Image (cartoon, rainbow, N blue to C red):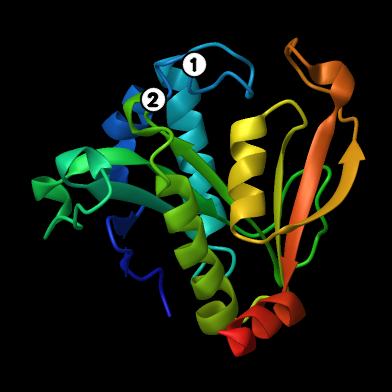
Amino acid sequence: MVQPILHTDRLLLIPLADRHLELEIQLDSDPEVLRYLGGRARSRDEVVASHAQRLALAGKVDGLGFWMAFGSDGGVRGSTPPPSEDAGEFIGLMMLPPAHGPDQPDDPTVTDLGYRLGRRYWRRGLATEASRALLRHAFDTVGQTRVIAQTMAVNTGSRGVMEAIAMRYVRTYFPRWDEPRAGADLGEVEYEMTREMWAARRDAR
């Protein structure tokens, strides 16, 4: 199994590939998008390095990785996925790699959920919609045991997505960051969805 193309009500999710590098550079050129990830725009060289790391991570566990999200009509409610990425608007980067960070377990059955959207697409429920699709893929297709998501405690928008998809708060911890971050004194939070939690939600529907 390789990373499949995924669809939601409004989004087309295409596995990350080298042809998407310029879109990643575009996304990371907005310091507001990276407000809770250092708060500054990334240089081209930094994004090139991140792109290579993402593709390497995508090869570690079959079916996991990164997806580029495309939508139509600004991704507003009632819009539909474009027929192809070329016909759509680039919305953002959706992440479902194997857990790999310094504060994450070294376990190939645990994956790390994340999302990064262009600013004009915020507050439209798109990260929530894509995250539900990624949870379904992680548990029902790949067979993961646990999905975690981490963000700064002050990042209420990201925490709202985690809570909207019924992830459970696990802990607050205090990592060392390479760059100063506003709100760092409040730490980082971790949420989770386990296979048992997912099955219980699925059976209740």
Using the rendered image of the protein, determine whether residue 108 is visible from the camera's viewpoint.
no
Query: Which of 60/116 is in front?
Result: 116
Q: Residue 28: horizontal and vertical position, in percent?
A: 43, 23
Q: Give the SS element for disc 1.
A: loop
Q: Earlier in the sequence, mark 1 or mark 2?
A: 1
* Residue found at x 60% / y 54%: 164
* CA–CA distance in space, label 1 to label 2: 8 Å
* Residue found at x 66% / y 77%: 198
Query: Which of 6/44 is in front?
Result: 6
Kind of residue at disc 2: Arg
Q: Is residue 193 above or below residue 48?
A: below
Residue holding disc 1: 32
Asked where in the image residue 57 lies, by quadrant, the reply is bottom right
* Residue found at x 50% / y 82%: 141
Q: Is residue 172 left or right of residue 87?
A: right
Q: Residue 7: horizontal and vertical position, in percent?
A: 30, 66
Q: Is residue 52 above or below residue 201?
A: above
Asked where in the image residue 103 lies, by quadrant, the reply is top right
Quadrant of the image for the N terminus? bottom left
Label annotation for residue 115: none
Q: Give the SS element for disc 2.
A: helix
Disc 1 to disc 2: CB gap under 8 Å: yes
Q: Residue 3: horizontal and vertical position, in percent?
A: 40, 68
* Residue found at the far bottom of this picture: 203
Q: Is residue 50 above or below residue 11?
A: above
Quadrant of the image for the C terminus? bottom right
| Count of all numbered marks drawn on residues in the image | 2
* Residue found at x 32% / y 57%: 13
Q: Is residue 7 above or below residue 42?
A: below
Label annotation for residue 119: 2
